[in-house]
Image: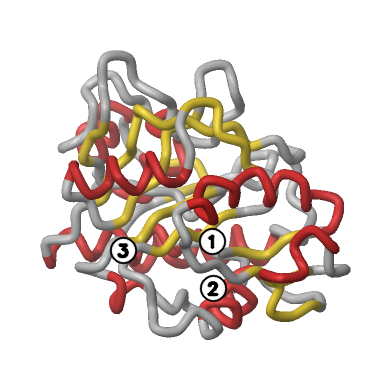
Amino acid sequence: MGVYRRANAEHVARLLEPALAQDWRTAWWALDEVAPTLATYTVGEGPGEKFPLVNEALRHVTPPTPWTIVSDDDVRFRRGDVVVLVDACRRSELDVVQPARAPGTHTTHAITGAQRLARARRTTFVESGPLVVVGPRFRDRVLPLPDELGMGWCVEFRWFDLLEEGCRLGIVDETTIEHVGPEEHEYETEPLHERLHAELAARGRRTSATSNGRSRPGGRGSAARRGFTAGTHRHARPSELVRAAYAPAP
């Protein structure tokens, strides 16, 4: 399920094909205009922020499905599909999961890039988009998504906190995706950066603003890397923003 723009209806239809072949239920919200090819699966239309609109779509899937996929409308699988992905999540006994980013494609956090010779891995981080899978063990803790987070920034902190309760975060490398949309955000991000700084500060993590408005961690990088990468692939190098989020301040 997710939110789509009519211009990206083709991507959504391709994403849904293997799921519909398995008789999976789905619900989508049209952000601008209902696409004829998706009309059967569209439960509403109109502007808004991602999480509240996804939650509205979620309310139309009754009874709740054991496994739930939340996706953006501009995702393309390079290897595998949503059915293969969920099967890998089951076999790996993961709870909140994302597919790996395909080699050579844009990634925000290096840890999400596909790892060679890996099928799936436990991590301490799963990004909120472009596609995330929520399993049955922690479905009621993750869904509905927090409306107050709007576009989803900082939800990764909440998923990270679930580790203490036994939640298994992970990345599936046997399925890979490409985010085909523009890298630039189509909404105002300054307030969201402010929220991120506030969240980091509340957790005792120091950051400073860079010239592009992104977060930069205080302290030595080596300590930060140790703080984040415990339990992840040893070659993963998360971005500065993520290191700041999960590494203890010196």
Query: Label 1 sits on what residue type?
Result: Trp
Look at the picture and state if 155 lies above or below 110. below
Quarter of the image where the N terminus is located: bottom right
Is there CB contact under 8 Å for labels 2 and 1? yes
Say which label, 1 or 3, has the lower sequence index: 1
Say which label, 2 or 3, has the lower sequence index: 2
Q: Which element is circle 1 on?
A: loop
Tag on residue 149? 2
Tell me the residue that label 1 is attached to: 153
Query: Label 3 sits on what residue type?
Result: Arg
Nearer to us: label 2 or label 3: 2
Is residue 205 toward the left or the right of residue 16 in the image?
A: left
Is residue 192 toward the left or the right of residue 36 in the image?
A: left
Tell me the residue that label 3 is attached to: 203
Residue at (26%, 27%) from the top-left corner? Answer: 119
Quarter-of-image position of residue 22: bottom left
Residue 223 coordinates in the image, percent (x, y): 23, 33
Question: Depth check: 221 or 226 in front?
Answer: 226
